[in-house]
Image (cartoon, rainbow, N blue to C red):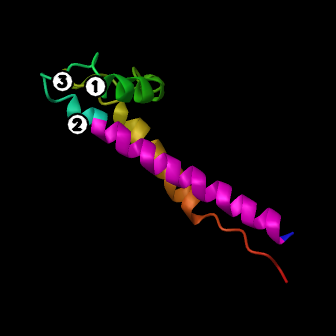
Amino acid sequence: MNIVINSFNLVFTSIANFSEIYLISILLKLSLAWFPTVNWYNEPFCSLNRLTDPYLKLFRGTIPMIFGMDMSPMLGIIFLQCLTVIFNNIQIESIT
């Protein structure tokens, strides 16, 4: 029984860590978008774009543009932060 509990704790911690790393990659992409000289067709920017765009496209169009800026990545960031907090706080303990 202890092995199953440890496995679940490992899965929850892994999901939280993955969402933190993915959040950092999204923030990096959004920060690089401010630089006009970034060529998104060259590596490593192409890989970063292909990694983050499918997730960000889920939220595109949900919030209207404000002063020509797309604010929809905020929803994606908030969702990832909530996911990270939830999975960091889940701990299953064995009853002995």
Q: Which residue is mark 2?
A: 31
On residue 38, the disc is 3
Q: CA distance from mark 1 to mark 2?
A: 13 Å
For residue 70, the mark is 1
User: In 3D space, how far apart are the residues under numbered discs 3 and 1 (Cα atoms)?
Assistant: 18 Å
- Visible residue check, residue 27: yes
Instruction: Farthest residue to the front: give it.
Output: 43
Give the extent of the magenta segment. 2-28
Quadrant containing the C terminus is bottom right
Vertically, is 38 above or below 94? Answer: above
Compared across the picture, whether 20 is left or right of 14 comes to left
Labels 3 & 1 near each other (Cβ < 8 A): no
Does residue 78 appear in the picture of this structure?
no
Looking at this view, is 41 or 72 the one in front? 41
Quarter that holds the N terminus: bottom right
Q: Which label's residue is closer to the chain start, 1 or 2?
A: 2
Which of the two residues, 25 or 88, is positioned nearer the viewer here?
25
